[in-house]
Image (cartoon, rainbow, N blue to C red):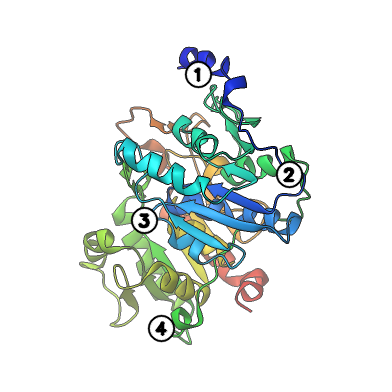
Amino acid sequence: MRVPFGLLDALQQPLQATRRARQHPRSIVVIKPCCLGDLIMTTPLLEVIRQNYPEARITYIAGSWSKVIVEHQPIVDQVIDCGSVGIAGRYRLSEYFVLARQLRRHHFDLAFVLDRSPMLTLLPWFAGVPRRVGPDSQGRGFSLTDRVPVSTTPTQLQHQAEIYLDLARALGLTIDHPRMHFEPTSAEREVIRRSSHPQIAVFPGGGSNPGMELTAKRWPLERYRQLVYRLVHELDADVLLIGGPDDTALTHALIDGLDVPTGKVVDLAGTLSFGQLAAQLEACSLFIGNDSSPMHLAAAVNIPVIAIFGPTSPQEYGPYPPDDPKHIAIWHHPTGQPCFFLGKMRECHNCTCMQAVSVDEVWSTAQRLIASPHNSEARS
């Protein structure tokens, strides 16, 4: 892979945009088409961009499936729906160049490319953006003016949010305790369920994205069932099962045979928009679930999170920021290195990392977070 990118790298001089970069950009474009959780992890960078360029107009290029994330970011001035462009095998080259021509009409001064795909790093060059900053992984950033190195070994892991923030660091921008953000609307907050008992959101799904299925990220359903039973009977909690329309079979299976009082477990899978889900999470005392977009959403609305990890690593994808005492990632990988790295999954037949996470461990962690003073602070 490095050979063709190296050859293209030799053509760097012809690939320079004709317009000169402004020292203080007036129009900035951020490019990250997919996916939901990844876009949530870009929000700390958005905060930094706005703080450093308060007068600039910020435009975000996002896919149809994931644009909801940036539509809930008040600091973003415009969202451009790029359809399926950027998802391998899901778009035509003609759609790509239509998007490039559309971006060229905006005369952007600065582009942040948050994807490692060479097609996406090329996009702002085709659009005539004079300064283009992004991660450079295995030479894929050949068309960028500011290439930020990214580790390509599983022994040197870095959180995705920090990789995005490194782009700001490369430009010398000031960074001050960034966090992830998601702002539900007042209308979305009107539909939430409230209770006098602790409400705990449980997400047993995950691993489904456009162009990729990674169901190995799911903790065994029977363990979720045992956990929910204890949350109801020992904590007197109301458990909200959450997820999208594709998760309903999973939540129905979890409830099947579960011996709990009527109304103590509510299946919300497939009933809420993403914004409504965020509003509902704001009213919860705790989120428990797999590495997924709902997990990142729970961290973004600042509630306690227990994230259960298997083939992926919390060092890369855990709730952010990782030093927040409300964020607990449970991971017991036998090698200490993820099976899923750089978009590829190593063959694994036993899922020992998921089997190593016990119900007792998750239960005791939930008890600790529910009783923590940080819990009431998060929801105040």
Callout 4 secondary element: loop
In which image quadrant can residue 225 be found? bottom left
State the residue position of label 3: 65
Callout 2 secondary element: loop
Mark 4 or 2, nearer chain start: 2
- Residue at (48, 60) in percent of width and height: 69
State the residue position of label 2: 22
Question: Left or right: 243 with respect to 43?
Answer: left
Please state which amino acid type lies under the numbered disc 4.
Val
Please state which amino acid type lies under the numbered disc 1.
Phe
Please state which amino acid type lies under the numbered disc 3.
Trp
State the residue position of label 4: 191
State the residue position of label 1: 5
Using the rendered image of the protein, determine whether residue 179 is visible from the camera's viewpoint.
no
- Camera-side mark, 1 or 3: 1
In which image quadrant can residue 294 be found? bottom left
Location of residue 83 in the rendering, given as x and y in whole percent from the top left corner: 35, 51
Mark 1 or 3, nearer chain start: 1
